[in-house]
Image (cartoon, helix red, strand yellow):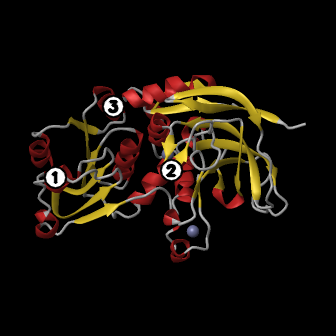
Amino acid sequence: MTEMMRAAILKDVAHFEVEQVPKPQITEPDEVLIKVLVCSICGTDVNVSGTMAYGSKDLHGEILGHELVGEIVETGSAVTGLRVGQRVVVNPNSYCCKCPSCRAGYRNHCENMKLMGLTVAGGFAEYVKTKEFLAFPISQDVPLNHAAFAEPLSCAMNGFSRLNITPGDTCVVFGCGPIGLLFAQLARASGARVACVEIKENRMAIARKLGLDVYMAGPDVKEKLMQKWGRRANFCIDAAGGQLVTAIDYAEYRGTILCFAGPRTAKEGWNFGPIQGKELTIMGSFIINDSMHRAVTVLESGMLNLDPLVTHILPLEELDKGIALMKSGEGMEIIMEIGK
Ligand SMILES: [Zn+2]
Ligand SMILES: [Zn+2]
């Protein structure tokens, strides 16, 4: 008889139903089966449940979710580095190790990438399976609601590692969602003077709770920062999207801009001259390359204040509500409790 499990199935636009579906089975020797404890909602889950598609893939009837924390309950015959009972977080982006990108060390640009919760079954379910090399042990001392940050934090840290922020630098972070507030805390932990720019009051309040200097986006912000810092920003991090032009304006000479969120469509009349005149470095960042183990270390060290970022903890049955809360911007980090 097929073993079954509970999973939230995407039925319609932003609508999930919890159903009994077959439990995943280990079929390859290097796989591990994970009992999901919690899985938080990513902006990607909100976007794709709104369009019901990821690229050319139709997502009707699929299981989303890729920011999960779980416990190993079974290991394939070739698994040597993980054992049953271990708590793990997961890199949801499976790379092939064989394509030119993987061979060059850019595994986040793998040509044969499989994405948990998008192209293969995800974590809004009681069980999920993955490859041994994609599961990372994390201490049981890290609260589950903090461990759930491992995937978004490793995405942020992949971008952050491209910057070289040192004490005395100035840094502007655009966007006070969970990712923006992780960046702001990492920059502060690196010794920078940090300012956050946001448009939503509820998110500004959470940034203040973290002790961050936060400004309502507007034409006066640059002047306020100049007065406070005596110079522009050595580093600008766009965690909101579409802030490249503002970031170019805020950037100090030889400044660096990280486009973590997409620069979006270039509008006519944008002046990219300062990229040359100010000797700027503009960077992009895409998912996780080799930052997962460092994210686990950061979470285990307790250096980041994460509790204010977790605004809602919901049962799997309320995934629709979670998606709506994220979409409205009222929700920040929303954690679905599954097997806790
Ligand atoms: Zn994500
Ligand atoms: Zn590859």
Image x and y of residue 11, in percent: 58, 30
Assess mark 2: CB under 8 A from ligand 2?
no
Residue drawn 17% across the image and 49% down it: 246
Which residue: 34% across, 52% down?
187
Total marks drawn? 3
Query: Along the polypeptide, which appears first: circle 3 or circle 1?
Result: 3
The C terminus is located in which quarter? top right
Using the rendered image of the protein, determine whether residue 202 is visible from the camera's viewpoint: yes
Q: Amino acid at mark 2?
A: Ser
Alpha-carbon neighbours of circle 3 within 10 Å: few (<14), some, or many (≥20)? many
Q: Which residue bears the numbered disc 1?
A: 250
- Determine the secondary structure under disc 3: helix
10 Å neighbourhood of mark 2: few (<14), some, or many (≥20)? few
Query: Relative to the observer, which residue lies in front, 70 or 261?
Result: 261
Q: Which residue is mark 3?
A: 203
Quarter of image, res 274: bottom left
